[in-house]
Image (tube, helix red, strand yellow):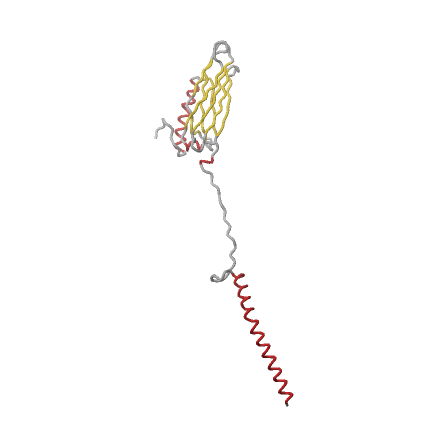
Amino acid sequence: MNKVKSKWKTALLSLTVAGAALLAVAPGSSALAQRNEDVEGGGGGGGGGYTPPRTTSTTTTQTLSDIPALYQEASWQSSNGGRYMNTRATLQRSGPLAGQLDAITRTKNSVKLTGFTGGVFILLKNSDGAVIGATEQKKFGVDGTWIGRYDRTDYWSAYFPADVAGATASMEIIQQHAAKDLDDQLAYWHDTVCRNTKLYGLTLPIGCTQ
């Protein structure tokens, strides 16, 4: 009988020790699980969870201040080869000089006894090819090679509204012997410019009716 009671006391003591061990381990395990849950689950309502870094993107928009200057060069020679003109032009399309056109024209004659007067003007065209600007005609005269000055270079300028310059995609240089034909061409282009600037909502040049 005493042996049976001793066995029960030993078993009961073992259970008591095991239970105490479980209670000692459980709180730590529970806290660790909670921390893992906070990290993996985003923290619930402010539990200090992990937040992925945000990515941002930027875009660059071209403005009028970014448009580069436009350059054009052209030459003309008479049918007999004795008369020659060359013009180089640069149009500022943005910045404080927007609308300023600077040109250099060389006029040369190789005929001995007769001179000539050359004329030049420049057309501005938009991306559709429509003429939206035109300079006035510049005239430069030279003598025959046996008479006097037969080769000259002249610097000249023209000015356009900034919006017209900004809309310009190309230039065309028209130059030849300054006869009535050239005057008629320029008159036609001035009328065309008035129509096209109205059509594209650009500033009208002087001389155009509203």
Q: List x then y, in percent, for residue 19.
A: 57, 77
Question: What quarter of the picture does the N terminus occupy?
Answer: bottom right
Residue 90 in the image: above or below residue 33: above
User: Looking at this rendering, what residue extends furthest in the right direction?
Assistant: 3
**Quadrant housing residue 167:** top left
Residue found at x 45% / y 35%: 65
Q: List x then y, in percent, for residue 34.
A: 53, 66
Query: In the depicted view, which residue is nearer to us: 174 or 139?
Result: 139
User: Looking at this rendering, what residue extends furthest in the bottom direction?
Assistant: 1
In-image side of 153 versus 6 (left or right): left
**Quadrant housing residue 63:** top left
In-image side of 82 versus 139 (left or right): right
Query: Count of labels shown?
Result: 0
Residue found at x 48% / y 41%: 60
Q: List x then y, in percent, for residue 182.
A: 44, 20
Query: In the depicted view, which residue is nearer to us: 156 or 132?
Result: 156
Residue found at x 50% / y 14%: 109
Residue 117 in the image: above or below residue 19: above
Q: List x then y, in percent, for residue 70.
A: 48, 30
User: Looking at this rendering, what residue extends furthest in the left direction?
Assistant: 210
